[in-house]
Image (tube, rainbow, N blue to C red):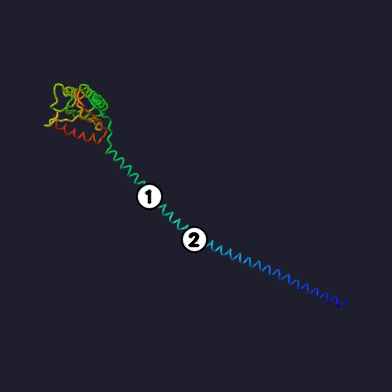
Amino acid sequence: MKRTSIVITLVSLIIGIAGGYAFSYEETSGLQSEISTLSIDYANLNSSYNELKTNYTLLQSDFSMLTTEFNHLNATYEQLKDDYSMLNESYIELQEAYEQTNYTHILGVYYSPDGECEEKVIEWIGKANHSLHILIYSFTLDSVSDALVNAQNRGIAVKVVFEKSQISQYSEYWKLRNAGVPVRNDTNSKSMHHKVMIVDDAVVLTGSFNWSQNGQKNNNENLVILDDENVASSYSKEFQNIWEDSI
């Protein structure tokens, strides 16, 4: 009986040891499988990481290149902006210069017979601030000579050159001279056919209109009023040349 008990105990011990080995082997095998799976996952993750790292490096390089290109383009833009600003300033200066040298403002165009020619001549005599220089072929309108005398009396420097062949008993030459207005008759051997009044060296009244009853009532005449200092300067030189050559 005792022997049987010992045998049973030994068999139980052997079975226990064998079972323990069997359990340990199965556990180890499971762990090794998990380790293998984790190793594969790690390898995949490591590969993805290296790929991302490579892509990041490439992106960094591209970003650096784009930054350099942007800075270059921005510098070019700023230079072009400065160039445009300078060109725009030059354009404005040229435009202003062009307008100053070429700008002629036509203040009015008038016609006779029975137009406004006489009235406009008198109106502009009244607008004068410092000077009235006149070259006139035929001048017999009392209304215009009265306006000139009034201008002289209010301090306007009035000078009138007449065509000598037109100084008759009807000419306003005598009234103006007697009123103290500086008048001269043209001594040119040819007719002085100008019909010009220069107001303040700035505005010019010119055209075919003679300051006469025929010019106002009977003839087809014209009067143009120009606001242009360059034109006025040219007419002033012509006036001065004729004035100096007249008596």
Of 175 and 2, nearer the camera is 2
**Residue depicted at x 21% and y 35%:** 234
SS for tag 2?
helix
Reply above or below: 94 against 188. below
**Residue depicted at x 56% and y 64%:** 47
Reply above or below: 27 against 197. below
Relative side of 133 to 7, left or right: left
Q: Residues within 10 Å of mark 1 (few under 14, many from 20)?
A: few
- Residue at the far right: name it: 1
User: Residue 191 location in percent, x, y?
Assistant: 14, 30
Which residue bears the numbered disc 1? 80
Q: Residues within 10 Å of mark 2 (few under 14, many from 20)?
A: few
- Residue at the far bottom: name it: 3
Of 172 and 15, nearer the camera is 15
Looking at the rendered structure, the kind of residue marked 2 is Leu
Figure quadrant of the N terminus: bottom right
User: Residue 94 location in percent, x, y?
Assistant: 30, 42
Looking at the rendered structure, the kind of residue marked 1 is Leu
